[in-house]
Image (tube, rainbow, N blue to C red):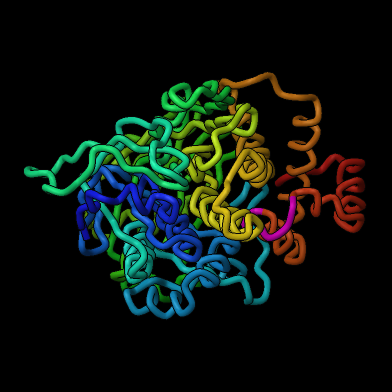
Amino acid sequence: MNAPLAVDADKRAARRAIVIGAGMAGLLAARVLADHFDSVHIVERDELPNEPSSRKGVPQARYVHQLLMRGRLILEQFFPGIENELVGFGAVPLDWYTDVHWFGPAGWMARTERGFATWSTSRDLLEFVVRRRVLSNNRITLHTSCEVVGLEKAAAPGAAASLRVRWHTPEPPASSLTRIDAALIVDASGRSSHMPVWLPDLGCDTPQETVVNAFVGYASRIYRIPSKHADSGWKALVVHSRPPLCLRSGTIFPIEGKRWIVTLTGASMDYPPADDAGFLAFAHSLRSQALYESIVAAEPLSAVHHYRRMENRLRHYERVAPWPEGIAVVGDAVCGFNPVYGQGMTIAAIDAQLLDRHLREAAGKHAIGHAFQRDVAAARRAAWTLSTGVDYRYEKTQGPKRAWHTRVMQRYMDHVVALAAERGDVYRRLLHVMHMLAPPFSLLAPDIATRIALRSMLGTTSR
């Protein structure tokens, strides 16, 4: 797994790509790059486990992670047969139309016929299976305990840039290099990315940032699924907040090993406690008692873990000019969303698709320029609007001043969600937007807008 880079590696730099980070965004980028380069090197600062388990660099893995439907479809395109592999490890097929019991701001969402299935797993298992598939490609090499400490202009012919790396193994590989040239370097190092600091070394400006912070915090715990739950009629449970009246929410999702991952969320610094009694009391305070009643007698299998770095942070690389050719930034390194909305892994998959498309359009020249970062920014626009639109409902949220149309759309979405609690067809269309299969403006369709206009005249939004 940790093969050293050859001393004469600079001679092959024109046919080499490097990925910084071995999380989902980095793994999916490497999968794509292997179709276009002779060798792909993933540089990861952590030592990675040989089984599905947590690691230091992904503390958020202890909390609920749902791969949206669009993300599932992309993963199946990249890794044919991955569903069977995941299910073989215990992943739970989950139909959002029938298996997810969802208490929204307007009450329980309408049930409808089956046909919108994803997989419910821990983040650890999903990443483990994807990593195993990626590393089965002999063009891809993973270098662990290896930290990138700088980026500079390349010296080797055909290379776009060079990485400076520091090994954290007890004895660094004897033939390793502290400087590695490549034709393409992809930064997939997540929220902690140092690309804003490195760009000036390449003669570029530091990117502007937009931050919307609702001061949201998680607390999460693993439980054994009670045997009596088989008769409950649901596999997953979602209890939404309803700001400003209630800032608290919670979810139960099944994961491998006949376990639940239970996550409680509070906004505006109303954080869920990390102690046993406080965790249960917070669950009891939700708008529906269904979650509390499900876990109060269930067997805990872990401690309570909490996490509070959940702001929406968008780095505007699309505005950096000139942009260094041969550098690409993807995943959370570009934009970290409030993870409550489950968009991150699917956005990483979309970025990998975009990377593949741009490389194919380059016709073997391996040229990735500013157009890629503009497309990456455009691919996030709808997800950013949805995520921040919800977060702006909380009174303590900090961020740029909202445009007038944000409040209008919030009011409109109140009506859409209320309709989704009454009509299965509207619920299905809302799910398609949430799972990134349809754009938000699809909810402005005449049949929905007409019903909402009528509701507005009657003065009804929620019950």
123 displayed left or right of 266: left
345 within the magenta span: no
13 displayed left or right of 332: left
Which of the two residues, 129 or 444, is positioned nearer the viewer here? 129
Which of the two residues, 454 or 199, is positioned nearer the viewer here? 199
237 displayed left or right of 168: right
Pinpoint residue 378: horizontal percent, then vertical percent. 68, 43
The range drawn in magenta is 434-439
Residue at 57 percent across and 27 percent down: it is: 212
**Does the magenta stretch mainly form a helix, a strand or a loop?**
loop
Pinpoint residue 33: horizontal percent, then vertical percent. 47, 59
Residue at 80 percent across and 25 percent down: it is: 404
Q: Quadrant of the N terminus?
A: bottom left
Q: Is residue 24 above or below residue 328?
A: below
Which of the two residues, 158 or 98, is positioned nearer the viewer here? 158
Q: Is residue 393 visible?
A: yes
Pinpoint residue 458: horizontal percent, then vertical percent. 89, 43
447 displayed left or right of 174: right
Which of the two residues, 413 or 276, is positioned nearer the viewer here? 413
